[in-house]
Amino acid sequence: MPDRRQPDSPTDDNPFAAPPEGRPDQPWQPRSGGDDGGNGDGNGPGDSGGQRGPARWDPTDPIQRRARYALLAGMWGFFFGIFGIPSVGLLLGALALYWGISALRGKPAATTGEPGAPKGLDALGPAARPQRTAAVSGLVTASLAILLAMSTYALQLAYKDFYVCRDDALTKTAELQCNTLLPDNFVGKVLKVPQ
């Protein structure tokens, strides 16, 4: 728009602007941050060589990969346990437990071999905090998923007569008769066939 005021130096901020007159063309270089003086060493924020930016997730590192797998498997195992598929919840919970423990105790891909060198997630340096959080969260959700699956199997074993009666009932009346096999407590009220 012609009525808008143009900045004083349009070529300083515009990477697509032509160079000023009289200055030769220069090969393209990636832009660096304003605080480092334009040294052009290629260490932007997030590069593993610099200490300025946050650490990035490296999918080739088995420790970081297992920490993420533990979180995802534990979360899905918990959901399957809540929604009544305990076999899948138990499987995912066991996998998440394995991956979470191996992520917390694992050795990094590039070990130095020194006896005093940090091991496990501590060897990742700044990248260890989010990965440790993911691994611990995976362990917690895996424990919950296994607890849900085991409690479902324990209920089915403790009240086996009720479940067999309910599954074999051909009519609603026969299914309601199975309620007499339940105890008169909170568990019985939860498992009771509604009328």
Image (tube, helix red, strand yellow):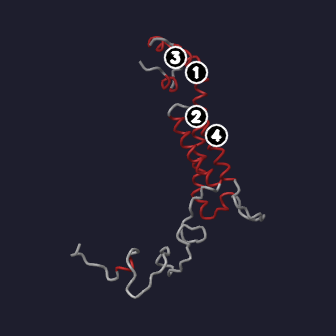
Nearest the camera: 185 or 108? 108
Q: Amino acid at mark 1?
A: Tyr
Circle 1/circle 3 CB separation < 8 Å: no
Give the structural element (helix, strand or loop) at label 2: helix
- Is tag 1's residue or tag 3's residue first in the polypeptide sequence? 1
Give the structural element (helix, strand or loop) at label 4: helix
Q: Nearer the viewer, mark 4 or mark 3?
A: 4
- Is tag 2's residue or tag 1's residue first in the polypeptide sequence? 2
- Mark 1 crowd level (few <14, some 14–19, many ≥20, 10 Å Cα): some
The residue labelled by disc 2 is 88
- Is tag 4's residue or tag 3's residue first in the polypeptide sequence? 4
The residue labelled by disc 4 is 94
Classify 14 as above or below 135: below
Mark pair 2, 4: CA separation: 10 Å
Q: Amino acid at mark 3?
A: Arg
Nearest the camera: 181 or 53? 53
- The image shows residue 56 at horizontal and vertical percentages of 56, 62
Mark pair 4, 1: CA separation: 25 Å
Classify 73 as above or below 103: above
Residue 166 got which mark? 3
The residue labelled by disc 1 is 159
